[in-house]
Image (tube, rainbow, N blue to C red):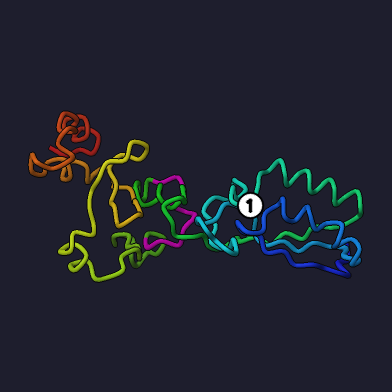
Amino acid sequence: MNNPVATYRLQFHSEFTFDAFERIIPYLQKLGVSTIYASPVFEATPGSTHGYDGVNPHRINPEIGTEKQLKAISQKLKQSNTGWLQDIVPNHMGFHQNNPWLTDLMEKGKLSLYVNFFDAVWTSPLFRDEPLMVPFLGNPLDEVVNNGELKVVYQPQQGLVLQYFDSYYPLNPAAYVTALQQDEANDLNPFQAIFKPIKALVGVA
């Protein structure tokens, strides 16, 4: 078992990347550092300065480097008998549109592949039929709607989404029919032709 006698804490972010760390390895070795204690390295919300607001645990944060770089660093540290202690975030994630698990849950609800990954209302027998509420509005809903801050728009990669300033959140497929049946002047009018397939999909008469 490795005994981390002399550790050095690293805080990775866009201003301190894997490249920046590699440049100081000789300095750390001269200090006698035997173990590197690294902040989370998986993809986090854009601009994160700490990495504890992760959005994808299957991908190295592109703002700090690549998996290939991390493997090369690992080999370099092994050659000098320097250990690596990795901090992780197992119990929470960043609330952001780049979080594929969260967006899948918001789009598909109980049918999401990740429904059991979240502590949502459906996991409680007391609130099993309650709607999923998410905290991304900066003001009360009525005020946001009256100010025109919340819109339904089309994104090529995502389909119909709720736009709130520069954030986008998916619509449940069951809401497509209502969204597409708005006034003909609506920007979504070109999609009128897909009414019937969507109705058949969601069981709307």
Residue at horizontal 67 percent and vertical 54 percent from the top: 17
> Looking at the rendering, in which quadrant would you find the C terminus?
top left
Residue at horizontal 41 percent and vertical 61 percent from the top: 120
Q: Nearer the viewer, residue 110 or 173?
A: 173
Q: Is residue 103 above or below residue 200?
A: below
Q: Is residue 171 above or below residue 6?
A: above
Quarter of image, res 177: top left
Q: What secondary structure is marked by label 1?
A: loop
Magenta residues, as a range? 112-121
Residue 79 in the image, given as x and y percentages of width and height: 91, 48
Residue 74 in the image, given as x and y percentages of width and height: 80, 48
Q: Which residue is mark 1?
A: 64
Quarter of image, res 189: top left
Residue at horizontal 45 percent and vertical 62 percent from the top: 119
In this rendering, position of residue 85 left or right of residue 76? left
In this rendering, position of residue 100 left or right of residue 127? right
Q: Nearer the viewer, residue 15 or 189?
A: 15
Q: Is residue 64 above or below residue 146?
A: above
Residue 30 in the image, given as x and y percentages of width and height: 91, 63
Q: Is residue 3 above or below residue 176?
A: below
Residue 12 in the image, given as x and y percentages of width and height: 66, 59
Dominant secondary-structure state across the stretch colored magenta:
loop
> Looking at the rendering, in which quadrant would you find the N terminus?
bottom right
Residue at horizontal 60 percent and vertical 50 percent from the top: 61
What residue type is disc 1 on?
Answer: Ile
Q: Magenta stretch containing residue 61, yes or no?
A: no
